[in-house]
Image (cartoon, rainbow, N blue to C red):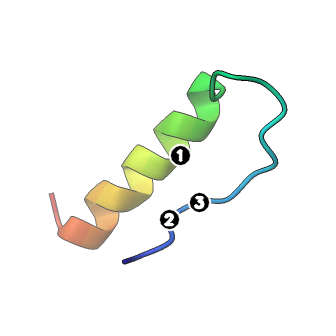
Amino acid sequence: MVLLHAYKKQSQKAPQHEIETALRRMKDILGN
C-alpha cells in the first residue's frame, strides 16, 4: 500500500482537486 495524498475530509464528497492530486501521484508512481 502506498499513501499518495492525505487531507482532512469535511464532507461526504472528496474535493475534485484532491482526487486529481492523488491520481497524478499514482500515475507518477506507476510510471504511466
**Disc 2 target residue:** 4
Horizontal and vertical percent for residue 18? 61, 38
Asked if marks 2 and 3 touch (Cβ < 8 Å), the reply is yes
Asked if marks 1 and 2 touch (Cβ < 8 Å), the reply is yes
Is 24 situated above or below 26?
above
Mark 2 is surrounded, within 10 Å at the Cα level, by few (under 14), some (14 to 19) or many (20 or more) other residues, namely few
Is 8 situated above or below 16?
below
**Disc 1 target residue:** 21
Q: Quadrant of residue 28?
A: bottom left
Mark 3 is surrounded, within 10 Å at the Cα level, by few (under 14), some (14 to 19) or many (20 or more) other residues, namely few
At a point 77% along the width and 40% down the height, the residue shown is: 9
Query: Which of the labelled discs sits on residue 5, or is there none?
Result: 3
Quadrant position of the C terminus in the picture: bottom left
Q: Quadrant of residue 27?
A: bottom left
Name the residue furthest front. 12
Camera-nearest residue between 31 and 16: 16
For discs 1 and 2, the disc positioned in front in the rendered view? 2
Measured Cα–Cα span from mark 1 to mark 2: 8 Å
Query: What's the residue type where badge 3 is placed?
Result: His
Is 20 situated above or below 26?
above
Direction from residue 26 to residue 4 in the image, left or right: right
Horizontal and vertical percent for residue 22? 48, 50
Mark 1 is surrounded, within 10 Å at the Cα level, by few (under 14), some (14 to 19) or many (20 or more) other residues, namely few
For discs 3 and 1, the disc positioned in front in the rendered view? 3
Query: What's the residue type where badge 2 is placed?
Result: Leu
Q: Quadrant of residue 15?
A: top right
Camera-nearest residue between 11 and 20: 11
Asked if marks 3 and 1 touch (Cβ < 8 Å), the reply is yes
Measured Cα–Cα span from mark 2 to mark 3: 4 Å
